[in-house]
């Protein structure tokens, strides 16, 4: 364990040298959720990049045994030790009917690495209002066959926001973060290493947003300059760092613009 901690400290030092103009998100280590053992460091520039190992301990990779080597097909977010939240379209395909073929990989940053914790699926609950055509209510809960071990500091849960039902949260202009293993370029393969990107919540009355989403009540537009979520990121989190110094889940990655990186085509997230 000491060797692992020393390695992470060195990695963090090297990262800071190469990203001097950056924001370090130091969370409240006493928080029961939304706080990682390694503080995320995000450059003050637009665009995505590889994340620091163990800075996002609530992200999981959804994998299917029918694919070669249980290939990653979507991301998910740890809500509680036995529950993962993801996008409905990720888990409604016909081949999802055999739950024993699905595994959840937690605690790993690289898809090529061994999973720190692996769990099978007990059941999948898709939002009853999910519309596959309009992407409304693109959200689902995955119950695990046994709880994740939170005594392992590299695996933990994200916080949920305290907001009223139907409220427009987060507000337009808010800086948010999304992470995932999606394509880094259009028509590319999935990224082996977990990527992070800072976005801004877009006013849903703007034409770029209103022409992209279908329901302002249950969907959010977010964008970045030449950067967006891409295929493979679906089911991952849209997060906000709050004044309470912890990360809260404000959206689930639903679908992206036509080529992932058009600044006038924002990504859409389930509220």
Image (tube, rainbow, N blue to C red):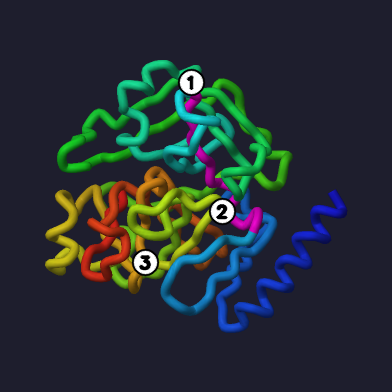
Relative to 48, residue 154 above or below: above
Residue under label 3, please give it.
227
Within-10-Å neighbours for mark 1: few <14, some 14–19, many 20+: some
In this view, the residue in front, 102 or 242, is 102
Residue 86 image offset from top left, x and y in percent: 40, 39
Residue under label 2, please give it.
193
- Write the residue at 40% across / 24% down: 124
Residue 168 image offset from top left, x and y in percent: 26, 58
Span colored in magenta: 53-65
The reply to whether residue 168 is in sight is no
**Mark 1 or 2, nearer chain start:** 1
Q: Is residue 55 magenta?
A: yes
**Mark 3 or 2, nearer chain start:** 2
In this view, the residue in front, 7 or 34, is 7
Relative to 223, residue 139 above or below: above
- Alpha carbon of mark 1 to alpha carbon of mark 2: how far? 24 Å
- Write the residue at 56% across / 21% down: 145
């Amino acid at each position: 364990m000491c060797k692992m901690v020393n390695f992470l400290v060195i990695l963090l030092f090297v990262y800071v040298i190469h990203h001097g103009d950056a924001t370090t998100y130091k969370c409240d280590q006493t928080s029961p959720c939304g706080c990682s053992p390694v503080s995320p460091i995000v450059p003050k520039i637009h665009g995505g990049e590889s994340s620091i190992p163990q800075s996002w301990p609530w992200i999981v990779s959804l994998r299917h045994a029918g694919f070669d080597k249980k290939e990653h097909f979507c991301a998910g977010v740890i809500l509680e030790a036995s529950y993962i939240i993801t996008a409905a379209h990720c888990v409604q395909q016909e081949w999802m009917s055999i739950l024993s073929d699905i595994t959840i990989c937690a605690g790993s940053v690289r898809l090529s690495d061994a999973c720190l914790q692996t769990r099978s699926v007990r059941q999948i609950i898709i939002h009853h209002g999910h519309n596959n055509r309009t992407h409304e209510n693109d959200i689902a809960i995955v119950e695990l066959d046994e709880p994740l071990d939170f005594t392992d500091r590299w695996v933990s849960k994200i916080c949920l926001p305290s907001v009223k039902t139907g409220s427009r949260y987060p507000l337009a202009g808010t800086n948010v973060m999304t992470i995932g293993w999606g394509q880094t370029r259009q028509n590319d393969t999935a990224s082996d290493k977990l990527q992070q990107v800072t976005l801004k919540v877009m006013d849903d009355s703007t034409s770029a947003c209103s022409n992209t989403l279908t329901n302002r009540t249950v969907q959010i537009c977010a964008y970045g300059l030449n950067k967006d979520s891409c295929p493979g990121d679906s089911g991952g989190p849209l997060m906000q760092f709050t004044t309470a110094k912890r990360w809260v889940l404000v959206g689930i990655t639903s679908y992206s613009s036509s080529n992932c990186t058009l600044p006038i085509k924002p990504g859409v997230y389930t509220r």
